[in-house]
Image (cartoon, rainbow, N blue to C red):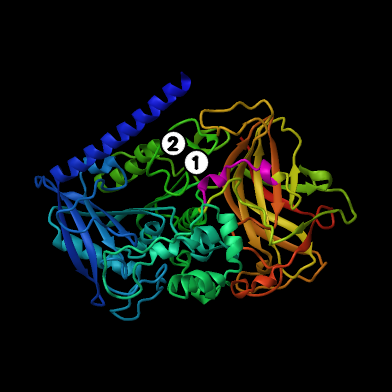
Amino acid sequence: MKKLILLFLLLLAIRVTAQDASADAAYIKENYSKYEYQVPMRDGKKLFTVVYAPKDHSKTYPVMMQRTCYNVGPYGPEHYKTSLGPSSLFLHDGYIFVYQDVRGRWMSEGIFQEMTPALEEHKTSTDIDEGTDTYDTIDWLLKNVSGNDGKVGVWGISYPGFYTTAALLSRHPALLAASPQAPIANLYHDDAFHNGAFMLTANFGFYPYFTNRQDDKPTQQAGKRFEAGTNDGYDFFLKMGSLRNSNVKYYQDTIRLWNEMMDHPNYDQHWKDRNILPHLHDIKTATLVTGGWYDAEDLYGAIKTYKVLKTKNPNTPVYFAMGPWVHGGWARGDGDHLGDVDFGAATSAYYREKIEFAFFSHYLKGTVLDLPKVSVFETGVNQWKAYNQWPPEDSKEQNLYFLPNGKLSFEAPKDKGNAFNEFVSDPNKPVPFINHKTMDMDREYMTSDQRFAAAMPDVLTYQTDVLTNDVTLSGDIWAHLSVSTTGTDADWVVKVIDVYPDTAQNNKWTGKEVQMAGYQQMVRSEAMRGKFRHGFDSPVAFTPGKVSRVNFELQDVLHTFKAGHRIMVQLQSTWFPLIDRNTQQFQDIMKAKDTDFKSETHRVFTSAVSPSFLRVKVLQE
C-alpha cells in the first residue's frame, strides 16, 4: 500500500510539474512578443540575439539577459521558448528577456574560443572579449528595444555562468545586477583538470556533442553524440587504453577543443589566459554568486568567484548562496535529496524565491531586500544558515591527523619514528569512482556510499572514534600529505566521509539494495596529480623512495558530523574513470603508450616527523 501511495504521489508531482510548464508556455505566447536580431559588435561581427518583450506597453521593464554557447533556440520568430528567465517567478513578474548566442556559436558570427581570454587592457577600438561583446549588446538593446527602463540584469549557469562573470567586466553603467551560477572561473581547475588530474568521464562524451561547428559559419545543427555502445564506462575506458587512443580509435584529431586539452596538460599560458579571476576588480554591479555543495562540474568556480569578488571589491554588494545541489540543481527540481541522502526539504524552491528572485527584484525593480550576504545550507543537519562572510568568522583552523592503525584525530601523532601505511596501486586495475556501471559522471557519486571502496586493498582508511559532540566543518579543506612512491609520479585522491551509526534508519530516498546503517557518505573529495606538487606549471618527478610533501585543496564544505557518527578519510591513487589513469612514470600522460602504465607501491606517513593531515576549519558555535 505504501508503495502504491508513493507511486501515486510521484505521478501527481510529475503531472503538476508538466501542467505548470504547459501553463508557462501558454502564458509566454499570450503575453510576450518574440523578435530576432543580429546585433553588431565593435569589430563588425554580428551576434544572434532573441528578445521576448511583454505585449503590455503601458509600462517599461528591466532587461534580464543570458548569453550562452548552448543555443538560444528554438530558432524562428514563430517558435517560442516554453520558459523564460531564471524561474517562472520572473516570467509572471514582467521583464524583457534577452538570449544571445555568443561569438562563434550556433547562429552568431566569429570563431569560438573556450572561455575567451579576458583582456585587461583594450588597446584599440576593435579589441574584443566577452566583456566588450556584453557592453556592445547592452548598448544596442537599450537603444533599439522599446519598452526597456534602462536597467539590465544578467544570469547564467555553468558556461553561461562564465559569460555572466565576464559581463561584469563590461562595467556597463546599466548593468545593475548579475548572478554567475556554477560559473567556470578557471577552465584548467574547473572542467578540464582537477589539480592536474584529467576529468576523463566528464569531458570525453561532452566535446563531440558540443562541437557543432569549428568555423565562422552560423548553424542551427547540433553536434553528434558519441555512442560508446555500452553503459560500462569502467570497461570502455580501460579497453580504450591511453588517452592518445581517444584520437587513434575515435576522434581522429577532428575535435579542436579536445586536442587543446590533450596538448596542454600543464598549467601553461593557454590555461592562464582562460582564468577570469585576476580580472575581477573595479566591479560596481551587485552580484549573487550561486553554487552547489555537490556540483561535480564547477564547484571551484562558484567558490573562487565569490571569494575573489568579495576581496577585490569590498564596497560592492556581493552575495553568496550555496545549497545541497548538483550542477544547476537550484534552477530545476526540488533539491530535496541526492542519491540516498535526504536533505529534508525542497531547498531549490526556497532558493528560487527567497534568494534569487528577491535579489533581482531589489536591484532591478526596487523592492525591499532582506537577504543576508551569505546564505548557505548546512548538510548533515539540513538547515539554512546566514552569515556576513564566508567562511564564517567563528571558524577555527585545526588539523585532523592520520595516525597508525587507521586512526584519525585532532591530536597530533606522538610517534617519533617512521610510521607509515602502504599499498600497491595498479593503474591497470584502478579503483572505480562509483559502485555501479555508468558511462557518465553520475553526480550522485559526490554523496554515494563508500563502503565498496573501503574494502579494497589499494584504499587506505582512517577514522575517528565515535563523536561525542557535533563537529561542523565550515570552509576550505586542505590535504597535507607526507608520501613516497617506488615510481616517479602518482595521483593522490582524498575523500572526506561521514560514517553513519549502526542505528541509522533508511529514508524515503534510500536505494533498494542500500542500508543507511553504517553508511559512508562522501562529503568532499578531490584528486591531485603528484608531479604538480610544486606548481601546476612546473611538473617535478618523485625520487623513488624519498618522502615528499603533497599539499592540495579539496574545496569548501559546510557539514556537521553529528554526535554518534565518525569522520573518515579514504586515500587512494586511482579513481576511474572519473579521472584518467596515471602511468606512475614521470611523463606527458596525454602522449603515453598503453605499455607505460606501471604498478607501484605508495606510502603515506603518519609520524610526528612526517605527518599527514587535513587542515580544516571547525565552526565554533
Q: Are marks 2 and 1 in contact (CB under 8 Å)?
A: yes
Q: Which mark is residue 178?
A: none
Q: Which mark is residue 347?
A: 2
Sequence-wise, the earlier of marks 2 and 1 is: 1
**How would you rate the neighbour count of disc 2 (Cα within 10 Å): few for under 14, some for 14-19, many for 20 or more?**
many
Instruction: In this rendered view, identify the residue nearer to me: 348 or 570.
Output: 570
Residue lying furthest left: 58
Tell me which segment is drawn in magenta.
Answer: 441-453
Q: Quadrant of the C terminus?
A: top right
With respect to residue 87, does 12 lie above or below?
above
Q: Is residue 220 magenta?
A: no
What amino acid type should be assigned to the residue bearing mark 1? Pro
Q: Position of residue 101 (x, y in %)?
A: 28, 63
What amino acid type should be assigned to the residue bearing mark 2? Thr
With respect to residue 172, does 395 lie above or below?
above
Q: Position of residue 607 (x, y in %)?
A: 84, 53
**Residue 231 placement, left or right of 87:** right
Gap in angstroms between the C-alphas marked 2 and 1: 8 Å
Instruction: In this rendered view, identify the residue nearer to me: 315 or 344.
Output: 344
Instruction: Using the rendered view, name the quadrant where residue 196 is placed.
Output: bottom right
Residue drawn at x 20%, y 67% is 39
Residue wearing tag 1: 324
Q: Position of residue 148 (x, y in %)?
A: 17, 53
